């Protein structure tokens, strides 16, 4: 193969090269943040495995089960006693890593959320985990009692639940942690530009489902994204993005996110997740 550089070496050498570099101090800070984030991600996974081993090795789960059995002879009530305590212990074991993660965000200027507000959000997430997790545990325990193929029935039940979760996420869960308002109220010009991008994709997201998120109350970064499924699909633009980015950059970020819908990544992700969950449910059995 003959390369262009071999035919026209002078032309290649004369072509200016645009190289983007950070100032040395900022580059070192970025590398440090990367190392912290990477270590925290892998460390969280390792810590989860160690916590599970601790529940088995030190018989915490067995003792918790014996405690639930001593309270009532009804199996479904035993599950309702066991599950929330187990989930609470699990969350408390992971709380130090969550605190470290927020400390890193504050130290590197990615977050301005105070600790009081952060603990309120953590409490909300814990409450959601306790409610949804207890429900899931109760279903799992009931299926185990009723059928040897509990893993298969659990998989069948989980499929519509995953779709439902994606649907209700922007309607119920997201507003619990951040403030949203119609984007047309504060920036109708941007709504028109977003509509022109959407018209070229075949995706149906009317202006009434375009929202501004008050991200500046907690974060310093910029973002724009699409979320939801079916009639809950919506566009979300962070107020930080509008403050610090020109319209063409906002449309660039939005176009990337909209591509997930155009390329059916949501549906593909659900399908891949369904296959993987079937395998792991079977392994778990």
Image (cartoon, rainbow, N blue to C red):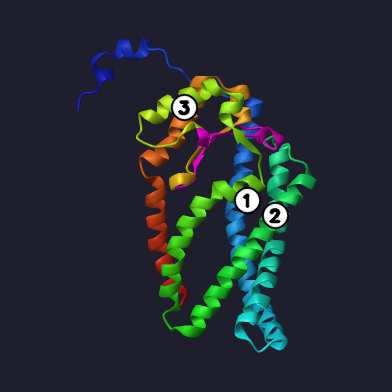
Distance in Å between CA atoms under marks 2 and 1: 22 Å
Could you tell me which quadrant the N terminus lies in?
A: top left
Q: Which residue occupies 38% across, 37% down? A: 203
In the rendered image, residue 179, in percent from the top left (x then y), is placed at 66, 39
Residues marked 2 and 3 touching at CB (< 8 Å): no
Which of the pair 76/118 is nearer the observer? 76
> Dot 2 lies on which element?
helix
Q: Which residue ends up furthest to the right in the rendered image?
A: 116
> Dot 3 lies on which element?
helix
Q: In this view, does 212 lie to the left or right of 197?
A: right
In the rendered image, residue 39, in percent from the top left (x then y), is placed at 61, 50
In the rendered image, residue 102, in percent from the top left (x then y), is placed at 70, 46
Q: Start and end of the magenta stretch?
A: 208-229
Which dot marks residue 229? none
Which dot marks residue 40? 1
Distance in Å between CA atoms under marks 2 and 3: 33 Å
Q: Mark 2 points at which residue?
A: 124
Depicted 158 relative to depicted 3: above or below: below
Which of the pair 87/231 is nearer the observer? 231
Q: Which residue occupies 69% across, 82% down? A: 68
Q: Which residue occupies 26% across, 13% down? A: 8
Residues marked 3 and 1 touching at CB (< 8 Å): no
- For label 2, the crowd category at 10 Å Cα-Cα, with few meaning under 14, some 14 to 19 and many 20 or more, is some
- For label 3, the crowd category at 10 Å Cα-Cα, with few meaning under 14, some 14 to 19 and many 20 or more, is many
Q: Name the residue under label 3.
A: 194
């Amino acid at each position: 193969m003959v390369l262009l550089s071999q035919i026209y070496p002078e032309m290649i050498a004369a072509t200016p090269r645009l190289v983007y570099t950070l100032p040395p101090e900022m580059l070192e800070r970025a590398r440090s943040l990367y190392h912290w984030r990477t270590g925290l991600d892998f460390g969280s996974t390792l810590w989860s495995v160690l916590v599970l081993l601790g529940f088995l090795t030190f018989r915490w789960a067995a003792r918790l089960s014996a405690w639930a059995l001593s309270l009532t002879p009804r199996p479904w009530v035993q599950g309702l006693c066991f599950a929330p305590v187990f989930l609470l212990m699990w969350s408390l074991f992971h709380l130090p890593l969550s605190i470290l993660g927020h400390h890193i965000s504050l130290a590197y200027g990615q977050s301005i959320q105070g600790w009081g507000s952060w603990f309120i959000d953590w409490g909300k997430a814990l409450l959601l985990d306790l409610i949804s997790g207890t429900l899931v545990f109760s279903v799992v325990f009931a299926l185990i009692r009723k059928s040897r193929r509990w893993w298969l029935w659990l998989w069948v039940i989980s499929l519509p639940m995953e779709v439902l979760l994606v649907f209700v996420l922007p309607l119920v869960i997201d507003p619990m942690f951040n403030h949203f308002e119609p984007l047309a109220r504060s920036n109708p010009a941007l709504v028109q530009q977003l509509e022109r991008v959407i018209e070229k994709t075949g995706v149906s997201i009317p202006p009434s489902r375009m929202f501004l998120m008050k991200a500046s109350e907690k974060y310093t970064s910029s973002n724009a994204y699409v979320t939801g499924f079916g009639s809950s699909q919506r566009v979300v633009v962070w107020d930080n993005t509008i403050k610090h980015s020109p319209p063409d950059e906002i449309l660039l970020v939005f176009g990337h996110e909209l591509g997930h819908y155009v390329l059916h990544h949501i549906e593909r992700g659900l399908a891949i997740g369904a296959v993987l969950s079937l395998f792991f449910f079977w392994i778990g059995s």
